[in-house]
Image: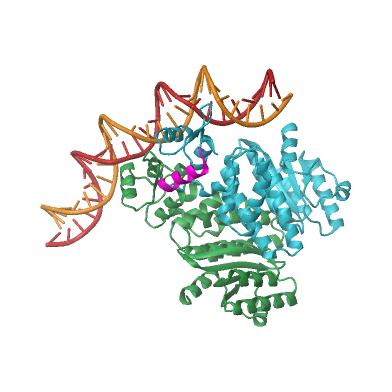
Chain colours: A cyan, B green, C red, D orange
Amino acid sequence: MYSPRQVAKAIGVSEASLKRWCDRGLLAVQKTAGGHRRISRRDLLSFLRGRDHDLVDPAMIGLPAESGKKEATLSQETLLAALLSADEQRLRGIFTSWYLSSKPLTRFFDEGLGPAFQRIGEMWQSGEIEVYQERQSAELCRRALYELISLIPDASDKKTLALGAGLRHDPYELANLMVEAALREVGRRSETLGVNLPGDTIAKAVATRKPQLLWLSVSSVAMESNFVTDCEIIWQACLAHQTKLAVGGRGLTNARRAKISYTVHCDRIGDLIDFLKSNG
Amino acid sequence: MYSPRQVAKAIGVSEASLKRWCDRGLLAVQKTAGGHRRISRRDLLSFLRGRDHDLVDPAMIGLPAESGKKEATLSQETLLAALLSADEQRLRGIFTSWYLSSKPLTRFFDEGLGPAFQRIGEMWQSGEIEVYQERQSAELCRRALYELISLIPDASDKKTLALGAGLRHDPYELANLMVEAALREVGRRSETLGVNLPGDTIAKAVATRKPQLLWLSVSSVAMESNFVTDCEIIWQACLAHQTKLAVGGRGLTNARRAKISYTVHCDRIGDLIDFLKSNG
DNA sequence: AAAAAAATCGATCAAATCGATCATTTCTCA
DNA sequence: TGAGAAATGATCGATTTGATCGATTTTTTT
C-alpha cells in the first residue's frame, strides 16, 4: 500500500491534487482507522492505465512499499532478476521508487545494490552466468545510477567538493557512482574522476582541484607494490592540501589497509556519509 | 514534465498557440486528472527537432543555456574546452543543441566527438594533459551520451536487435555508446553489452540474443594472437545465427583487418549506418 | 509502554491552467 | 496586388493546481 505522498511523488503531482483526485473518486483509496488514505498497487495501476499517465515510471511496482525487514531481501531478489535479465526499465523503476520512498540511498546501496553485485560476481566466477551478463548488468546499473544522480537536486553546498577515483587495473566504476549519488543526497558537490587511474595523476587532481574529500574505491589490486606506492603518493597530496582521504571497497583487505595511510576507512557507503556528518 | 506556459516561454510563442499545437497532435501531451496539459522533455525535444523553432529561453525548461539549435556547430575547440574543463553543463548543452538541430548524429560523432577524443588521447600521451583529465572527459561524455540516448524516441523497429561490444583489454566505451545512439536515431533497437569482454562470451551473447547485427569496437589490442582467436570465435557464432558482424575503430589497422573475418568494416559510424540502410 | 519524530489530515488561498471567443497578423493563390 | 484562409496572440470567467497551516494519526525510538 502506498501513501498519498509516495504516489504524488511518483507521478509528479502535488500531494494536494492527489488527495483531491481520491476524494473525487478518480483514484480508489482505502482508509486507515484514523482516516489516512492508503492506495493499493492495483488501484494505482488502474488509475494510471485509465488516465494514460505513464508519467514518471510505471515500474514503480517493482518495489514493495511496505516497511520492515522483508524489504531488503525482497528487493535483492527483484534487483538480481532485473539485472540478470537486462531489464533496463524495471531496474530504473526499482531505483527511482527507492529514491521516491525517501529512504536513504546508502541503505539501498549497502544492503541492496552492493550485495547484488557481489552475488553477480560470485555467479560469474563460478560460471553460473556468462561474463557478458555481468558486464551488461554493470552497464545497465551505470545508466540507472546516472539517472538517479540526475534526479537528486543540485548540491546545496557549492563550496566543498568531493572527488572519487579508482586506481590502476581496477575497473569497478559502480562504487564511485554510488558514492557520488550518496554524497549528492546529503547536499555535497561531488565528481567522479574515473577508474583505472595511476596514483600520481590522482595526486595531481587533488593538487589542482583541492577537494575537501577524496574517495578511493578499491575493488581489486593487480600489483601489491604498485598499490602501496600509489596510495602513498595520494596520501602525501592529501596531506599537503588538507584533503581527507577515505578508502574502502571489497578489495581493501586488512593486510592491505595496514600498509597504507588514510583519514578514514569505510566498509560501507553509509559509513562514509556518517563520517562526513560528524567531521564537517 | 513541463506546463504549457513553461514550454511557450522556452520557445518564444504564445501559450494559446502552444495549446492549439497540442490539441492538433503536433506535440504529444499527457493530461492530469484535472485536465491540465503536461509535456515531457522527450516529447518536447522531439517536437522541436522536427520544426524550426529555436529555444529562446532554454533555462525555462532546465536546459543549459547553450542548448539553442542555432548554436549547433561542430566547433572542436568548444568541445575540447568543455571536455577538458570538466564542464558538464556546457557539454550537455552542446549535445542537446546538436540533437535539436536535426543534423544527423553520425556527423557529430564522426567529425566532432570522435576527433576530439583522438586529440585528447594525443594530448594525454604527449603529457599535455593529465591522465585524470582524459578519464574525467570520458566519464562526462558517457553521461552526456546516456542523456542523448534517452532523448531519442524508442526504436520503431522492435524486432531487429543490434548488440555492441568491446574485446578484452579494450576499455574504450564511448564508441559503443555512439553507435548505440546512432542506431537508435535511425529507429533500430540497440544494446551495449560492455567492454573488456572475452571473445567466447560475446559469441554466447550472439547465440542467446540472436541479434541481427553485432558491432565490435576495436580501439586497442593487447595481445595480437588473442585478438585473432577471439574474432574467429565471434565470427563463427555470427555465421551460425545469420548475424552480421561489423567491425571498426582506431585500433583496427589494415594488418589486423587482414587476419580476421567480418561482414563489413566501418571506418566511421556513418559508414555503419549507411551499410545498414542499404543492407536491410 | 511511553515519548519523540514523522507523516497525513482537512481547509484555505494565491497562482496557474482550462476552454472559448475575438481581433490581428501571416500565408496562399488567383 | 488583394481577397480569403489559416494561424497567432490576447483576454475572459470557471476550474485546477500547489503551497501552507495547526490538529491529528502513524511510525520509530527509547
Q: Residue at 49%, 68% (x, y): give it.
A: B159
Q: In this picture, which residue range is highlighted in magenta?
A: A39-51
Q: Name the spot of residue A165 as percent of width and height, x first.
A: 72, 50
Residue A47 forms part of the magenta stretch: yes
The picture quadrant where one finds residue A105 is top right
Q: State left or right for residue D21 relative to residue A252.
A: left
| Residue A153 at least partly seen | no
Q: How many marks?
A: 0
Q: Is residue A87 above or below residue A62?
A: below
Give coordinates of residue B67: x percent, y percent: 47, 50
| Residue located 52% across and 73% down the image | B271
Residue A36 in magenta stretch: no
Main SS of the magenta segment? helix
Q: Residue B45 or A17: which is nearer the viewer? A: A17
Nearer to me, A65 or B68: A65
- Residue A228 is left or right of residue A62, and the answer is right
Quarter of the picture containing the N terminus of chain B is: top left
